[in-house]
Amino acid sequence: MKTILYMAITANGYIARKNDETPWSKEEWGSFFSKVKEAKNIVLGRKTFEMMKSNGNLKEIGDPLVIVVSNKMKNNLDNPNYLFVNSPEQAIETLKEKGFNEVFIAGGAALNSSFMQKGLVDEIYLDIEPFVFGDGVKLFSENDFEANLELLSIKNLSKNVLQLHYRVIK
Ligand SMILES: NC(=O)c1ccc[n+]([C@@H]2O[C@H](COP(=O)([O-])OP(=O)(O)OC[C@H]3O[C@@H](n4cnc5c(N)ncnc54)[C@H](OP(=O)(O)O)[C@@H]3O)[C@@H](O)[C@H]2O)c1
């Protein structure tokens, strides 16, 4: 089972403005979309899930199976495409049981951080957007971990947007 963390970030490491807005490019969105399509699933923190659901992003990315990590929300079965679990381990286990071979982790900061802290991320894609923010939402919410990375590839998504692909060395 391969776990992939995929994020758009500013040149100084923020994944959203302070007010949660994300001004990312259509090229970044297109690359994200094609990776979700390959994985056919997406694992989201409860806050990112609520944002993506209410602004129609989940429909736009083709309604993949959504695993929402939350301590508060439970399965209500009004949409069988949304499954609620209470830990990163349970997200991976649920996708394994359903026969997936990739876990596509797509934020936000708290979710990213808890997967990293538990050593559960195999690869990281960072799409570097041409912005710096003085303040905002960090790639990882503060937590106690450190990881060494191997750079697997660098790709230009456009003249202005660079994609870095890393392996997490275990
Ligand atoms: N740039 C990008 O590519 C990108 C992608 C996604 C999101 N974002 C941005 O990220 C921001 C949201 O990030 P966030 O850190 O505030 O929220 P988040 O990670 O989306 O959601 C946080 C919530 O997820 C649940 N959660 C996370 N880790 C958990 C764990 N280990 N066990 C149980 N539950 C867990 C908890 O839900 P409960 O409170 O329900 O228990 C927690 O309150 C937004 O600004 C969004 O725009 C950016």
Image (cartoon, grey):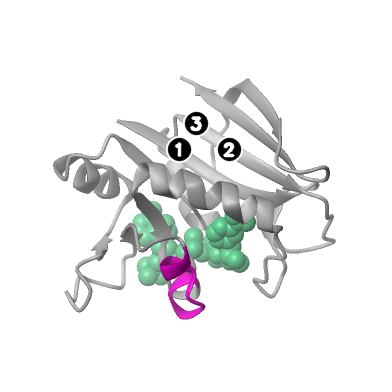
Image quadrant holding the N terminus, namely: top left
Give the spatial CA distance, label 3 vs label 2. 7 Å
Q: Which mark is residue 125?
A: 2
Residue 30 x/y as whole percent:
59, 52
- Nearer-N-terminus badge (1/2): 1
In which quadrant of the rendered view does residue 165 lie?
top right
**Could you tell me which residue is drawn at 16 percent across and 45 percent down?**
98
The answer to whether residue 149 is seen in the rendering is: yes
Give the spatial CA distance, label 3 vs label 1. 5 Å
Residue 80 x/y as whole percent:
19, 68
Q: Is residue 59 magenta?
A: yes
Check disc 3 and give the amino acid type.
Glu
**Residue 51 relative to residue 157: left or right:** left
Check disc 1 and give the amino acid type.
Ile
The reply to whether dot 1 and dot 2 touch (C-beta < 8 Å) is yes
Residue indicated by mark 3: 123
Q: Is residue 22 placed above or below 140 in the rendered structure? A: below
Label 2: which secondary element: strand
Structural crowding at the residue carrying mark 1, measured as other residues with C-alpha within 10 Å and reported as few (<14), some (14–19) or many (≥20): many
**Could you tell me which residue is drawn at 20 percent across and 79 percent down?**
78
Q: Nearer the viewer, residue 129 or 30?
A: 30
Give the spatial CA distance, label 1 vs label 2. 8 Å
Residue indicated by mark 1: 4
In which quadrant of the rendered view does residue 39 lie?
top left
**Residue 24 relative to residue 36: left or right:** right
**Residue 20 relative to residue 70: left or right:** right
Residue numbers of the magenta segment:
52-60
Residue 96 x/y as whole percent:
20, 39
